[in-house]
Image: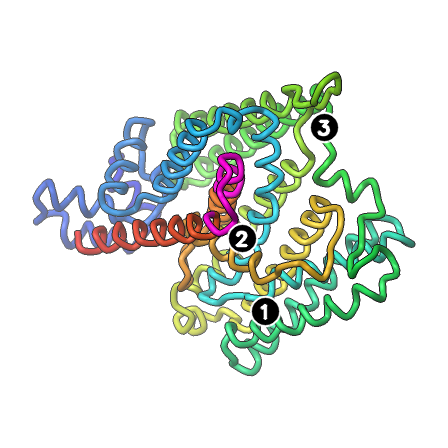
Amino acid sequence: MSPIQRGAEQDPAAADVIETTGARQEPQEAAATETALVGAPELLANSVGDYAGIWLKRVRNGESGVLPIILGLVAIVIYFQLRNSVFLSAGNLVNLMIQAVPFILLGMAEVWVLLLGEIDLSTGYNGAVGAVVTLWAAYTLPWWIAIILGLATCAFFGALQGTIITRLGLPSFVVTLAGYLGLEGLLIIILPHTGHGAGGSISVPSNVLDDLTAGNLSPVAGWVVMVVLVALAGLFMITRDRRRRASGLVAPPLGVTLLKIAVMAIAGILVVIVGNTNRGAGFATLRGVPWAVLIVLGVLVLYTVVTGRTRFGRYIYAIGGNAEAARRAGVNLIRIRTLCFILCGLTAGIAGIMLASQLNSIGTDFNGGEYVLFAVASAVIGGTNLFGGRGKMIHALLGGLVIAVIYNGLGLIGLSAGATYIVTALVLLVAVTIDTLARRRGTAG
């Protein structure tokens, strides 16, 4: 079966295109039609070679995916390593992973609403308020109850804003801007009443909360966890493909699936090697993969499954692509949009708790405006569309890493905070420009 036939099997619209144009097309036109087919490249391919060929055709036609941001990230890393050899040291790489956590999680929060073509400007202060609630409760309650209360608080504010936006038909920009200001005021009001900490701040009272970013797995546990996670992911992918074939559906070639498993294994091995390298000073020993890496990975996998493998996720993309068409197809726009704002708030709460763990406190000097802008930048730099319908949680991971690398690298070479903002702004503009021009080229082609 050819790649075109495979595409037709999974997409009736593609079959119509082939039926009406295939007999009259020149070879160049047929290749363009094949590239335009809806569906993942692995489902159109018969082999690893076909997969690579289809992927390259899509890149040439503007569907470059995350390739530009990955190449840009590699270029930035090489630049900072040439400027300062400490950059790729194990200690700095682990610090970079931890620094990236708030950016990545806040970027994931924004992805939920950006997929709808909406925005949430309150995520920074919403996460900070949730962190304060968590730390305050942790002084008298078990740490896990404190975390639940903090996340519930953030989800509540997300639900409140989502309800106002969907029920009253108000712009999300205006409603969440009001939420930004209101939550900033709430943060300033409640902090002095906590009775813990000085100067308008509250410190982390629990060792467990502190270990969210400061704690590490043992070296042996790091290898065990990595092997188990890769094995489970590989088993899931192979089992899924077998079920698809048994049901008469198109499934990726075994070689493509094994290639993806190998890439995951290599990435896991590199992370564990870096984490297990001794990064202690003097006679002190500090080894192990940070817990924060596992937390981010867990959130990423969960959210990726929800957006890519569930009916709820398909509804989100449908609304972001064409809300009116989704409504006519029977999708409950109010419910789906409200749930997305709830998930945005919930994820902001996770980011706020992780940030509090990283800073060991939350205070009135918290700059929620800066963090929400970096949240949007993380999602957009990674490849999420500001106008809805296109984006993945992995985009927030890549964009958050870019911002963290810039912060970390510019700090190592001694540039000011102002330079950091300027460089981040330029990277954001370049990323959006490249993505826009590539897609215009693809549409014109």
Disc on the earlier residue, 2 or 3: 2
* Magenta stretch: dominant secondary structure: helix
Measured Cα–Cα span from mark 3 to mark 1: 37 Å
Between disc 3 and disc 1, whose residue precedes?
Answer: 3
Q: How many angstroms separate mark 2 from mark 3 (CA)?
A: 26 Å
Q: Please name the residue that numbered disc 3 is placed on.
A: 217
Does the segment drawn in magenta span residue 21?
A: no
Q: From the viewer's perspective, tell me whether residue 404 is left or right of residue 130.
A: left
Name the element at disc 2.
Answer: helix
Q: Residues within 10 Å of mark 2 (few under 14, many from 20)?
A: many
The mark that comes first in sequence, 2 or 1, is 2
* Above or below, comparing residue 85 to residue 237 in the picture: above
- Which of the two discs, 2 and 1, sits closer to the camera? 2
- Range drawn in magenta: 406-419
Residue 383 percent location from the top left of the image: 40, 50
Instruction: Confirm whether the magenta stretch covers residue 408.
Output: yes
| Nearer to the camera, 72 or 62 | 72
In the picture of the structure, the residue carrying the numbered disc 2 is: 107
The structure residue drawn at horizontal position 69% and vertical position 23%, both measured from the top left corner, is 280
Callout 2 touching callout 3 (CB < 8 Å): no
Q: Residue at x 46, y 60 (%)?
A: 115
Point out residue 182 in the picture as x, y percentages from the top left corner: 66, 74
Disc 3 marks a residue whose amino acid type is Leu
Residue 332, relative to residue 248: is it above or below?
Answer: below
Tell me where residue 70 appears, x and y as whole percent. Answer: 40, 38
Residue 398: % across, % down: 47, 43
